[in-house]
Image (cartoon, helix red, strand yellow):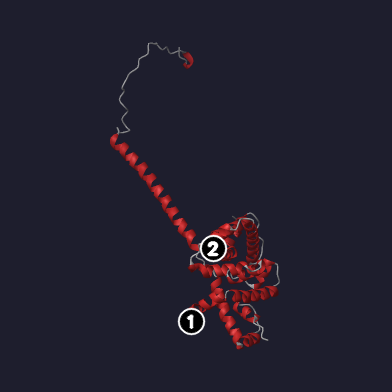
Amino acid sequence: MVNHEVISAFLDNETFDPQALSDALADPEGRALLIDLLTLRRLAQPDEMDSAQPSGRARAPRMRRLAAIAAALTLAVVGGYQLGERAGVPATDPPAPTRVVTSATTWQEVAQGGVR
Amino acid sequence: MSADAEALFADHYQPLVRYLCRAVGQTDDARDLAQDVFLRISRTVVPEASRAELRAWLFRIARNLVIDYHRSRQRTPPSIAATAEAERPPSQDVVAAVNEALAALGDVDRDVFLMREVAGLGYDEIAKACDLTPDAVRSRIHRTRLRLRADLAAPIATHRTSTMRQSGRRQ
């Protein structure tokens, strides 16, 4: 009976006996095994897993939502500043007093910085 | 993270995630586990060793985390998995069949197979990662392949033609 283990070693790039491989591949079952193992290798790759896609799809809306929030905040800050600039008095002029309060007390300067 | 750990991360992240994806069957969980692996190595001193030995060391850590992962999942109710299976679209049948066939394997056989086929480790590296001899790895891989070939006969027959077509295109 032919030992087909050598086909696995050949596929894995490991050391193998060339004569044993020749014998194994002379057998139709050995050749069918080689083809099936190549197919199995392809099936085993995680690239074929569709489960990789949902996580990517789930991240995209989250990123879009964060970007929208950031844009709205920026718009609110810049818009608020510009509205204030248009409607308000320039920051360089002091505001005009609306009421002047006078005190009946007569303040006296004393030594050592005190107030009487 | 130390320079050694960063180099390990850069060199082996992709094959590690590929192995973990198949070992746990969930891409998000696989990525979390990969981060756990690199978190662990960042907290320890990376041993002075050859590239192959470091790779074996890394996959040994990953394998232990996979074992812990499966243990913790056994304690959770199976209703979530059952629901997911019931809602599965037909296009995912092959993926599900491969996952089920892999899940039906013994832990060591599955790890040996995935480290070779998905992560690309050599027999010596797998032997170090799984506490086996290279000869034992060689036998296990072949035995596991024969079992998967039988368990996945229908998907293999379906995909055989496309595989051969692609191989022919590469030549």
Chain label for disc 2: B
The quadrant of the picture occupied by the C terminus of chain A is top left
Q: Name the residue under label 1.
A: B168
Where's residue A83, x and y in %?
Answer: 31, 38
Q: Mark 2 points at which residue?
A: B85
Image quarter of residue B1: bottom right
Given residues A78 and B6, the one toward you in this image is A78
Where's residue B40, x and y in %?
Answer: 63, 56
Give the farthest residue toward the left: A86
Chain label for disc 1: B
Q: How far apart are marks 2 and 1 (CA)?
A: 36 Å
Q: What element carries label 1?
A: helix
Count of marks, rendered view: 2
Q: Both on one chain, marks 2 and 1?
A: yes
* A69 to the left or right of A27: left
Instruction: Say if residue B29 shows up in the picture.
Output: no
Q: How crowded is mark 1: few (under 14 residues within 10 Å), some or many (20 or more)?
A: few
Where's residue B111, x and y in %?
Answer: 63, 67
Where's residue A53, x and y in %?
Answer: 48, 62
In percent of the image, x 47 and y 59: which residue is there? A56
Q: Do the residues labelled 2 and 1 touch (CB within 8 Å)?
A: no
Image quarter of residue A105: top left
User: Does B44 appear above or below A36?
Assistant: above
Instruction: Say if residue B89 shows up in the picture.
Output: yes
Given residues A53 and B37, the one toward you in this image is A53
In percent of the image, x 34 and y 39: which residue is there? A81
